[in-house]
Image: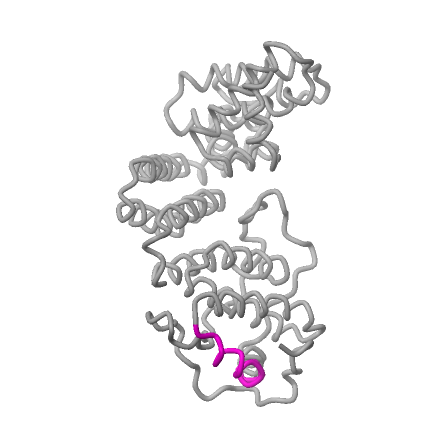
Amino acid sequence: LPAKVAPTTQVAAAVGKTVPAAPPSNPAAKATLPPSGSAVPFNPDDEPASPANPLQPLAKTRLPVPSEAELAAARAALKDLYAQDYKQAITAQDRTELARKLVASSGEAGEDHAAEYELLRIARDLSAQNGDLADALKTLVRLEQRFKIDGQAMRLETLKLFQKSPSAGEKNGELATAANNLVAEAIGADRFEKAEEALKIAKAAAKRGGDSNLLASAGRTQTWLEAAKRAYADVPKAELRLAASPRDPQANQVVGVYICLVKGRWQLGLPQLAKATDRELRLLATLDLTTSKSSQEVFNLANQYWDLAESKPDMEEKGLKLRSAYWYSQATRELPSGLDKIKARKRLMQIIEAYGQEETESATGRRDIAAAAGRASND
C-alpha cells in the first residue's frame, strides 16, 4: 500500500457509479469497495457523554464530517488508488488484512480529512461485511473519536451490515452482546427507537444461537427497555415543574430516578435524588454526595445501595446495584485485607454475572473490574 493517500483535490468532485456494498457470499470472490451511506452530519450535543466506550470520552476537537462532494471525490481517488489491493483480496483473511491496512493508512491522510473519513468508513464496512464485528466496531470508535458523527446510528448500521455477512451465523453471541450494549447506549441518550432496533437484532441473534443465556439476556434487556420508556414518560413534565420550582420533591424524584437508576449518570442526577420524596433514596444520595468518606463509610454505602436494590423492581434494582458496584470497587482499593474486602469483591462478581462485564466497567470506571472481583476467591 502507498505510504500516503492521494489528495482528493486532484480528482473530480463526484463519482459516477458506486460499486456494490455487500461482498459476495463466495469466500473466494473478490472484495469490492463499499459505497457511502454514513456521511450524514450529526449534532454532537445530542449524543450522551458516554459513547460506545464510556471510559474513553469523545475528543473535544472532533472534526466536522466532510461534505458529500468531498467524500465522493475521496471515494473515487481511493477506488483508483487501492484497485489492485481489492483485486487481490480473495479470501476472508485477505479482506481482514485489507481493512486493517485501510485503517492504518487513515493515520497518514494528513489534512485530507475526506480521505481519512472514507478510509475509516470503508474499513468499517468491509470488516462488518466480512464478519469481523470486533474490528468493525473498533474502527467505528476511531471514526467517532475523529469526526462529529452519529455514533449510535452508525453502530446500528454496523450490526445490520454484519448480520448479512457469511459468518454471522457463527457469531450470534458476539452480535447479541454488541446489540445489547447498543440498547443500553441508546437508552442513555433517550433514543428509544434506536434501542428498539438494536433489541430486535439482539433477540434475533439469541434465537438463532439457541443459547439459553443469550435468550435470557435479551429478555432482561427488553424488560429494561420497556421500563425505561415508562420511566421517561413523566420526565419532560417533571423537568418543566423543576424549571418553575427547583425543590419540587416529586419532580426531583422522577428526574433523579431516571437520570441515575435508568441512565446511570449519577453525578448528574444525584442532586435531584437528594431532594426526592423517597426517604431512603434521598438519604443515600446525600451520603453519596459527601466528598470525604473513610474506607469503612465507602463499604457501608455500597452495602446500603445493595440492600435497597433488593426491595426494588427490576429496573431500579439494576441501577442501584450498579451504583453499589461503583462503591464496592472503591472499597476493594481502600479496605485492608479481611472479610469486608472479600465481601466487596464477591458482590462485584455477582453484579458482573447479573449485568455483564461491560456495564459493570462503565458503572465503576474500571477496565480491570473483572480481575479485581475475581481475586475474591484468592483472599
Give coordinates of residue 186: x percent, y percent: 45, 47
Snapshot quadrant of residue 230: top left
Residue plotted at (63% across, 48% down): 57
Image quadrant holding the N terminus, namely: bottom right
Residue 96 in sight from this viewpoint: yes
Give coordinates of residue 264: x percent, y percent: 52, 34
Drawn side of residue 75 relative to residue 224, left or right: right
Image height of 309 relative to 366, above or below:
above
Residue plotted at (44% across, 82% down): 18
Snapshot quadrant of residue 355: top left
Give coordinates of residue 262: x percent, y percent: 46, 34
Image height of 224 relative to 155, above or below:
above
Question: Which span is picked out in magenta?
Answer: 76-90
Give coordinates of residue 155: x percent, y percent: 46, 56
The foreground one among 307 and 350 is 350
The foreground one among 41 and 135 is 135
Residue plotted at (29% across, 36% down): 212
Q: Main secondary structure of the magenta part?
A: helix
- As drawn, the residue found furthest toward the top would be 339
The foreground one among 248 and 315 is 315
Image height of 109 relative to 275, above or below:
below
Image quadrant holding the C terminus, namely: top right
Residue 251 in sight from this viewpoint: no
Image height of 73 relative to 226, above or below:
below
